[in-house]
Image (cartoon, rainbow, N blue to C red):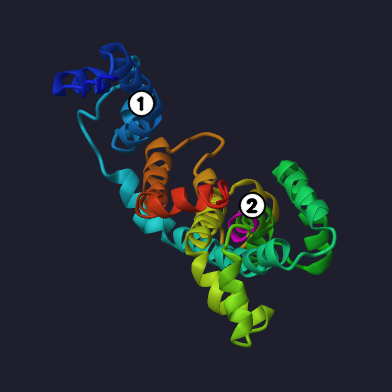
């Protein structure tokens, strides 16, 4: 007769769950190190111009000023609006291309699907500088330089390969019973995509949309190459214009960076749960 295992007591569970103090301290230390640039950005945004080159530097804004933020709201609102327009346009174009492409690769059994997936992976490895040079030559002939539409297309070329791969991974794991039920009801491939596959792929769509928006929002390489002399420039290029030959408005630069970081931070916090589900979608199949 075998004896039953003794259930763990509450103190044993606590000792097991409790992490060593040095691991907690190490985690806090690395977190502070990674967040220090963010703190320094905020600190400099409130620092007086005369104190920007102080030696030693001011670790806290003892005499804070809002002149940097005044410059943001008086000079940078058009640039913020342009970045918002480019970001939303990139989201729409990326989802419109990546979702049907992922559906076709995952569920329609296209010839050469594996080859196309490999080419999409290779496309993500091409440096953005190389792509920008190629776009410049093409846009110069088509008259698309210094246009918002040209930037939307250029930024989408980075987001689309990621979106197609993510959609393909998720849609490959959709139960075939759903698709068969749609076919029994008389739905064709396009209606099945619109009515069944796309609603089920909500988390993947939010992940692709967030990636596309953040890339377009933070892009500087394409903006500086393809839209340097445009009437409407994004916020990254507008920040760069603060840097002059003789003066550098660091408090205005940092204040603009703080304001420009707010939409991205809000989106990441709000969509974190959906992004985690979308990235891991299709990783494990039943």
Can you name the residue that lies furthest to the left here? 10
Residue 167 in the image, given as x and y percentages of width and height: 61, 59
- Judge whether residue 121 is colored magenta: no
- Mark 1 or mark 2, which has the lower sequence index? 1
- Residue 133 seen in the figure: no
Residue 90 % position (x, y)? 59, 63
Residue 240 shown left or right of residue 43 in the figure: right
Q: Is residue 168 magenta?
A: yes
Give percent across and percent down for residue 18.
24, 20
Residue tagged 2: 162
Q: Which element carries disc 2, helix, strand or loop?
A: helix
Dot label at residue 205: none
Residue at screen point 48% across, 35% down: 247
Neighbor class of circle 1 (other Cα within 10 Å; few <14, some 14-19, many 20+) is few
**Residue span colored magenta:** 167-171
Q: Quadrant of the N terminus?
A: top left
Image x and y of residue 252, in percent: 39, 43
Q: Residue at x 55, y 57 (%)?
A: 208
Q: Which residue is mark 1?
A: 31
- Quadrant assignment, res 16: top left
- Residue at image coords 81%, 68%: 142
- In terms of secondary structure, what is the magenta stretch mainly? helix
Q: Residues within 10 Å of mark 2 (few under 14, many from 20)?
A: many
């Amino acid at each position: 007769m075998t004896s039953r295992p003794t259930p763990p007591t509450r103190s044993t569970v606590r000792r097991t769950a409790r992490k060593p103090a040095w691991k907690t301290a190490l985690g806090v230390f690395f977190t502070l190190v990674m967040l220090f640039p963010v703190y320094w950005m905020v600190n400099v945004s409130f620092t007086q111009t005369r104190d920007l080159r102080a030696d030693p530097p001011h670790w806290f804004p003892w005499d804070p000023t809002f002149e940097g933020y005044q410059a943001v709201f008086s000079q940078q609102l058009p640039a913020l609006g342009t970045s918002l327009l480019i970001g939303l346009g990139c989201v729409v174009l990326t989802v419109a291309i990546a979702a049907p492409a992922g559906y076709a690769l995952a569920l329609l059994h296209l010839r050469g699907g594996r080859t196309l997936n490999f080419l999409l992976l290779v496309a993500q490895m091409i440096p953005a500088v190389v792509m920008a040079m190629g776009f410049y030559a093409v846009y110069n002939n088509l008259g698309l330089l210094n246009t918002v539409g040209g930037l939307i297309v250029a930024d989408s070329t980075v987001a689309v390969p990621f979106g197609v791969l993510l959609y393909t991974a998720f849609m490959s794991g959709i139960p075939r019973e759903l698709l068969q039920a749609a076919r029994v009801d008389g739905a064709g491939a396009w209606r099945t995509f619109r009515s069944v596959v796309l609603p089920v792929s909500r988390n993947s769509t939010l992940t692709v949309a967030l990636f596309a928006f953040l890339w377009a929002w933070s892009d500087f390489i394409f903006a500086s190459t393809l839209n340097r002399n445009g009437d409407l420039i994004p916020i990254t290029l507008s920040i760069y214009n603060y840097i002059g030959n003789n003066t550098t408005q660091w408090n205005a630069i940092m204040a603009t960076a703080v304001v420009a970081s707010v939409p991205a931070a809000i989106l990441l916090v709000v969509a974190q749960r959906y992004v985690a589900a979308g990235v891991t979608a299709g990783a494990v199949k039943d």
